[in-house]
Amino acid sequence: MKALVYHGPGQKAWEDVPDASIREPTDVVVKVDTTTICGTDLHILHGDVPAVTDGRILGHEAVGTVTEVGDAVKGFSVGDRVLVPAITKCGRCEYCQRSMPSHCQTVGGIGWIFGHLIDGTQAESVRVPYADTSLYAVPASVTNEQAIFLADSLPTGYEVGVLAGKVRPGDTVAVVGAGAVGLSAILTTGLWGASRVIAVDTNKFRLDKARDFGATDTVEAGDNTTADVLELTGGVGVDVSIEAVGYPETLLTTASLVRPGGTIANIGVHGVPVSLPMQDMWIQNVTLTMGLVDTVSIPTLLKMVASGRIPAEKMGTHSFTFAQMDEAYDVFSNAAENSALKVVITPS
Ligand SMILES: NC(=O)c1ccc[n+]([C@@H]2O[C@H](COP(=O)([O-])OP(=O)(O)OC[C@H]3O[C@@H](n4cnc5c(N)ncnc54)[C@H](O)[C@@H]3O)[C@@H](O)[C@H]2O)c1
Ligand SMILES: [Zn+2]
Ligand SMILES: [Zn+2]
């Protein structure tokens, strides 16, 4: 079969590899019908994730069809249409039982293994360990182009942003960074009845998208971001302030927007230390949350996509075939210039 193989920083190739096959009785093999690229794949290609070594097939998001089933698998059969999420879970370890499979101890100490610790989903087929507890059947009314965004970005914005931030009816929410993850937070903030959602980004295309995804106000990030957001909230600050970029300055901005008693929910992946102004923050009774997505909200999100409450398909702006994998990476790497959000990649 063919797959996108990582060959060290800056190097990848769509090339022939051995077919994906069952290794454990709890595995299935899934023929990949739709996949996408995540910002994390770009981090890997920059060499930022040393656990990913030469020869690894990239990708941790897929929708596909089961083609082989291990002897111990009870819940899935050949022909089933399934969502392969970014997080794999054994279902039995302490973290899985606490609904925190992001830290599943059985699959490698961390739930994110595809395109990281084992071969991933940017391939014609993928071996899925712990299939019974990790895969989701896709309802007939949900298309592949909708389901693919439930593998990672939508649950991330929802769980690490909206749920961790404890958005409640009537709340005013700021979302700093309107990429796929920030937009997912914006899209799902309405489910908890936020009255105002203020999107902050440096990019005008992303701010336009934010309105389309449900933001009531937009602020172009710059020197006056904090003042602009405070003005929109009558000087009070927001109830929930969500960070979806991953830079020290954007976390500081996010923290500066919250009212006393509010919550700062950090989603961004940070590569360097951040100095928070604790001398100002300690007296504010604020909560700061952070974490890796668990993807445990997928069943909820699937129902809401199926019923039309969440228009997940809005996330896909560009489509490519497997043969155009390089082009897909080029467009996604320069997403802002290409007016791109997420790319949809299919066999043909
Ligand atoms: N915690 C998790 O489990 C988890 C999972 C997936 C992704 N992430 C992280 O979430 C973050 C967002 O992911 P994404 O895919 O949406 O990324 P993205 O690059 O598509 O979006 C980031 C957005 O931030 C904007 N931005 C850049 N600098 C800014 C600034 N100074 N002020 C305001 N906006 C600014 C960009 O214009 C862009 O729209 C990343 O750090 C990613 O690694 C975290
Ligand atoms: Zn990802
Ligand atoms: Zn586990």
Image (cartoon, rainbow, N blue to C red):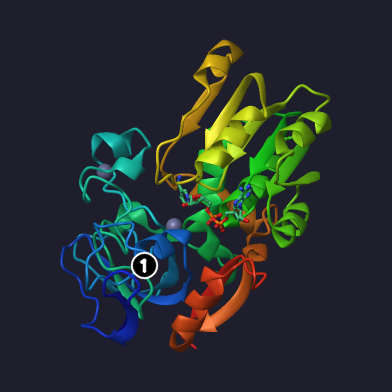
Q: How many marks?
A: 1
Judge from the rendering whether residue 88 lies leftward or rightward of residue 216; answer left or right.
left
Query: Residue 2 appears in which quarter of the rendering?
Result: bottom left
- Residue at 30% across, 41% down: 103
Query: Residue 343 appears in which quarter of the rendering?
Result: bottom right
Q: Where does ligand 2 appear, by image quarter?
A: bottom left
- Residue at 72% across, 53% down: 210
Instruction: Give the x, y percent position of residue 63.
Output: 46, 69
Q: Cβ of disc 1 within 8 Å of ligand 2?
A: no
When the figure is inspected, residue 222 is found, relative to residue 125, above or below; the finding is above
In the structure shown, which secondary structural element does the residue marked by tag 1 occupy? helix
- Callout 1, which amino acid? Leu
When the figure is inspected, residue 114 is found, relative to residue 254, above or below; the finding is below
Nearest the viewer among 29 and 324 is: 324
Asked whether residue 84 is in view, the answer is no
When the figure is inspected, residue 252 is found, relative to residue 187, above or below; the finding is above
Instruction: Give the x, y percent position of residue 39.
Output: 47, 60
Nearest the viewer among 178 and 64 is: 178
Residue at the disc numbered 1: 45
Query: Residue 139 appears in which quarter of the rendering?
Result: bottom right
Judge from the rendering whether residue 87 lies leftward or rightward of residue 145; answer left or right.
left
- Residue at 21% across, 50% down: 108
Nearest the viewer among 196 and 246 is: 246
Instruction: Give the x, y percent position of residue 57.
Output: 29, 72
Please rate how many residues cluster around mark 1, counting C-alpha atoms within 10 Å: few if below 14, some from 14 to 19, many from 20: some
Outermost residue on the front side: it is: 223
Judge from the rendering whether residue 78 lies leftward or rightward of residue 288; answer left or right.
left
Instruction: Give the x, y percent position of residue 135.
Output: 38, 58
Asked whether residue 148 is in view, the answer is yes
Nearest the viewer among 201 and 187 is: 201
- Residue at 57% across, 30% down: 264
Q: Quadrant of the image for the N terminus?
A: bottom left
